Amino acid sequence: MKSHRILTIPALFAAILLFMAACESTINNSFEDSIAPYVELEAVEGASNTTFTIHKGDAKGMNSYFAFDVSDVTNNTIVKEGLTEGWCLEWNKPITSNGDVHRGIDNYSTYGSETWRPLNYLLSIKNRLIAEDPSITYKEIQVSIWSLIEEPRFDLDEVLASGNMPSDMLTDGQPNFSIEKVKAIVEKVRLENSVYTYSPNSPYLIFAHTGDDSQNGGFLTCDNPDTEFCEGFYTISGSVYIDANEDEIKNDLESGAQNVTVTITDPHGNTIEQTTSSTGEFSFDVYTGDAETEYTIEVLEMTDDPDDFNEGLFTNYTPTSSGPFTITIVSDNVSGVNFGFAPQIEKMIEQFEEGTITLKTENFKVLEKADASCQKFSSSPGQR
């Protein structure tokens, strides 16, 4: 038995060596290829094992391939929790992105990386490119990103010829993006990226590593409005208020209208909405980089939200300064974008007496602080 064991161990060892030799090249190449994109990158402290809820970008009103809702971040000023634009970094892998939750995401910073310099340069000028040519969409940007990444290799002509283009970039088998614009963007970036200088206040890519067979993703540090150190992020704020004296100016005695849906639309037709706070206020965070950008803000009478106060607002109040307002962001925040509505007192009293409205309705809290012209209605029987 002892001699049998002595003979078996070397034989087994030799077999293992032969197996390792046969597989070494394949295993090493596969492993090296899989870690190549982020092997030089530094892990972002406090942003390992994070959770991403991934949506299609247009589903969240964003001009990007994905919309990442980031959570489970701890004590970090670079990666912040919340919704941010997301990009695909591996064109040849799938990932579920219809509000699907992905856990265990590790994040790496590309700051200072020569490998990632071309892509960071592209993302730093993305908004300016779109401002100069509004026909450029997130699809041209996404295909340009794939073209600039070293691994996995992506050659636009080869991928199209082989029929391997991701299906959401095709319509009836044909590209639904401009090949000419992609090639022009890629050429521009390759010629100019050497001038790009990393700066702590400039946007740069965070590499989001899934750790499984799903594609890795990326997002800009500055695309999250809660990121504290970024330049090019601005706030557009204002209120929807009861313009009791109908002078189109909001004063301290005039109350805000809560639960009113306000929309903001960028130059490319992307629209995001939010409802006003209990004091009638709203605030939108926008990222323009260094491009002068125009936005349209409005309060619509009819919306898709059955629970907001928009329809009731237009039914019982007369707009005094209702927009829409066109706001141009140059280099500063914009505030005081106020939508005024004057109460139709006689109409409200008539409806109240008919029983078609009741002061128990949450929406009529906006009347509680109206000035003297509204006091008769505010003190009617049945007030909460």
Image (tube, rainbow, N blue to C red):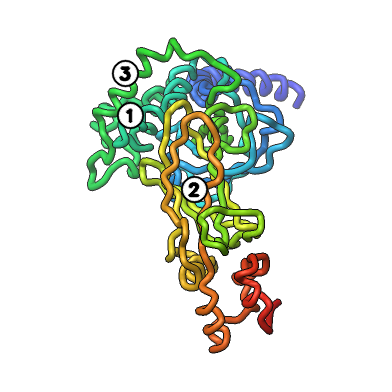
The quadrant in which the C terminus is found is: bottom right
Give the number of callouts. Answer: 3
* SS at circle 2: strand
Q: Nearer the viewer, residue 289 or 57?
A: 289
Read off the residue under disc 3. Answer: 187
Alpha carbons under labels 1 and 2: distance apart: 27 Å
Residue 246, given in percent of the width and then of the height, sits at: 52, 61
Q: Give how far across and how far down residue 298 sits, in percent.
A: 44, 53
Is 91 on the left-hand or right-hand side of 5? left
Q: In this view, does 137 lie to the left or right of 369?
A: left
Mark toward the start of the polypeptide (1 vs 2): 2
Q: Distance between the residues labelled 3 and 1?
A: 17 Å
Of the image marks 3 and 1, the number of the one nearer the N terminus: 1
Type of the residue with mark 3:
Glu
- SS for callout 1: helix
Give the residue displayed 64% in from the left and 31% down from the top. Answer: 228
User: Closer to the camera: disc 1 or disc 2?
Assistant: 1
Query: Which residue does the numbered mark 2 point to in the structure image?
Result: 55
Q: Quadrant of the N terminus?
A: top right
Q: Is mark 3 on a helix, strand or loop?
A: helix
Instruction: Looking at this view, name the residue that lies furthest to the right.
Output: 2
Seen at 37% across and 18% down, the residue is 189
* Dot 3 crowding, Cα within 10 Å, few <14, some 14–19, many 20+: few
Q: Which amino acid does label 1 sit on?
A: Glu
Which image quadrant is residue 278 in? bottom right
